[in-house]
Image (cartoon, rainbow, N blue to C red):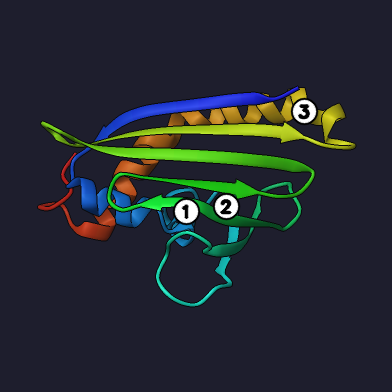
């Protein structure tokens, strides 16, 4: 029992700007404040393979997320542990209007979470619909309207 949630959308900034903002999990606090409650980078140095974060999302326990692949400015992959294991991948590609973001989140429930998984899955799918607009707004705020106009 798993769920795969995909997203594909265009943002009005350079691929490098989109990649740098989105590949740092701490920025999820800016674009997803209703769902993402805390994020702490627990490794030193720049974001890349091996970067670890401690994070908590609404309704869930704290989990550790590690970057398992990182090819700036094109793609990265992450793995989250816990009762709701996650595997995340994202690609950023040039687009005539800025950058195209293509992401995939695989959710794998373990233990007691399997019982709640149908409800959890529905919540993720509902939230996913708002993700492109939330990210566009956050990119405009981060990079400025002139550099990241949607």
Rendered-image quadrant of the C terminus? top left
Earlier in the chain: of badge 2 and badge 3, it is 2
Side (left or right) of 32 relative to 46: right
Side (left or right) of 40 relative to 18: right
Residue at point 13% right, 53% down? 147
Image vertical order of residue 69 relative to residue 103, above or below: below
Helix or strand or loop: what does disc 3 sit on?
Answer: helix
Residue at point 47% right, 53% down? 28
Quadrant of the rendered image containing residue 20: bottom left
Residue at point 50% right, 31% down? 128
Q: Do callouts 2 and 1 mark residues in contact (Cβ within 8 Å)?
A: yes
Q: Nearer the viewer, residue 111 or 148?
A: 111
Residue at point 64% right, 49% down? 80
Tag count: 3
The residue singled out by tag 1 in the image is 28
The residue singled out by tag 3 in the image is 117
Task: From the top left corner, tell me how far across and down residue 89 is, in percent.
Answer: 47, 39
Label annotation for residue 128:
none
Q: Nearer the viewer, residue 118 or 74?
A: 74
Q: CA distance from mark 3 to mark 1?
A: 23 Å
Quadrant of the rendered image containing residue 141: bottom left
Helix or strand or loop: what does disc 1 sit on?
Answer: helix
The residue singled out by tag 2 in the image is 36
Task: From the top left corner, tell me how far across and down residue 17 is, in percent.
Answer: 23, 53
Image vertical order of residue 130 relative to residue 43, above or below: above
Image vertical order of residue 116 relative to residue 88, above or below: above
Earlier in the chain: of badge 3 and badge 1, it is 1
């Amino acid at each position: 029992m798993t769920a795969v949630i995909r997203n594909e959308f265009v943002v009005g900034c350079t691929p490098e700007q989109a990649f740098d903002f989105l590949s740092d999990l701490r920025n999820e606090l800016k674009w997803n404040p209703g769902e993402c409650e805390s994020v702490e980078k627990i490794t030193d140095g720049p974001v890349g393979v091996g970067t670890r974060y401690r994070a908590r999302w609404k309704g869930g326990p704290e989990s550790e997320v590690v970057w398992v692949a990182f090819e700036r400015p094109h793609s990265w992959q992450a793995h989250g542990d816990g009762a709701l294991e996650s595997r995340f991948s994202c690609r950023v590609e040039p687009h005539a209007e800025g950058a195209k973001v293509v992401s995939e989140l695989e959710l794998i429930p373990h233990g007691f979470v399997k019982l709640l998984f149908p409800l959890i899955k529905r919540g993720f799918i509902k939230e996913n619909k708002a993700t492109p607009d939330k990210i566009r707004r956050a990119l405009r705020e981060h990079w400025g309207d002139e550099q990241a106009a949607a």
